[in-house]
Image: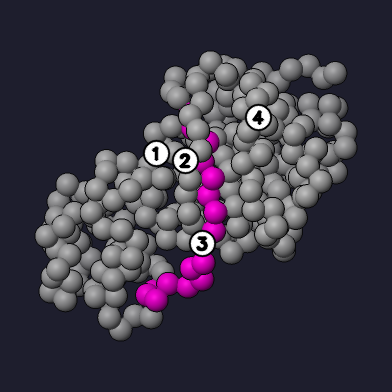
Amino acid sequence: MAELVRAKKHLGQHFLTDEKIAVAIVESLKHTDKYKKVLEIGPGMGVLTKYLLQQTGYETTVIDIDYDSIAYLKTNYPEIKDRIIEGDFLKYNFEEYTTEPFAVIGNFPYNISSQILFKVLENRNAVPELVGMFQKEVAERLAGKPRTKAYGILTVLLQTFYNIEYLFTVHENVFSPPPKVKSAVIRVTRNERVKLPVDENLFFKVVKTGFNQRRKMLGNALKPLGVDLVPAQRFLTQRAEELDVEEFIQLTSLLYPTEK
């Protein structure tokens, strides 16, 4: 057996130690009819990997930037040694892994969890499902509903193309070292939306601008866009957190009526 891997603070590592929770996370992959490959991010010492490898419905590959974790996995899980990607998920070109659909799973480093989601969002047509461990506050934000404090930019952008389910909360004491916050597992499943009826970049811009000053009504918050706000009159007395995805699409179409 290789020596245990020491968690590295700069990589945001907190290794899950509870086997029952590991099993529950792996079993949360529910849409395996849509893919035959699963990519695990940051496997650490393989607490999820061991259960992923027991599944016969898909093939598991892992990606990690930590050399010590990679060495540990190669020693303790030799059956996966040819399916270990040494690299940074955020910079990785998925087409080097596969051109087929694949799921993403992991006990994600909290310092890059939002960036992981933006990366998945950019490649949404390749990723039909994601199951991951997040800081509880982030998980609540992702699954947030309009008119709540948790609802924000990433909520709207992700919920435009994915359905979000908050699955369960995880206590700090099941990690080594324990984080200072509670955690939660969510499932992110691709919805049926193929293409927006408005320009995607403009839609993202409207959402981000609206939330940049979330306490202001949209009539003031959207002024930096430099467009005529009058056509969107019915939205201007509301705040960004009051609009759902469909309303943000409508708002974008009113502000940019000729952009398709």
Q: Which residue is mark 3?
A: 191
Do callouts 2 and 4 mark residues in contact (Cβ within 8 Å)? no
From the viewer's perspective, tell me whether residue 49 is left or right of residue 162.
right
Name the residue rendered at 39%, 76% in the picture.
197
Name the residue rendered at 75%, 34% in the picture.
51
Q: Which residue is mark 1?
A: 140
Give the mark count: 4
From the viewer's perspective, tell me whether residue 55 is left or right of residue 229.
right
Residue 114 placed where, x, y %? 47, 43
Alpha carbon separation for disc pair 1 and 4: 20 Å
Q: Earlier in the sequence, mark 3 or mark 4?
A: 4
Q: Is residue 209 above or below residue 11?
A: below
Alpha carbon separation for disc pair 2 and 4: 16 Å
Q: Which residues are magenta?
A: 183-199
From the viewer's perspective, tell me whether residue 130 is left or right of residue 163.
right
Alpha carbon separation for disc pair 1 and 2: 7 Å
Alpha carbon separation for disc pair 2 and 3: 16 Å
Name the residue rendered at 57%, 30% in the picture.
11
Mark 2 element type: strand
Q: Is residue 95 above or below residue 26?
A: below
Mark 4 element type: helix
Q: Residue 166: give its label.
A: 2
Q: Which residue is mark 4?
A: 22
Visible residue check, residue 97: no
Which quadrant of the figure has residue 242?
bottom left
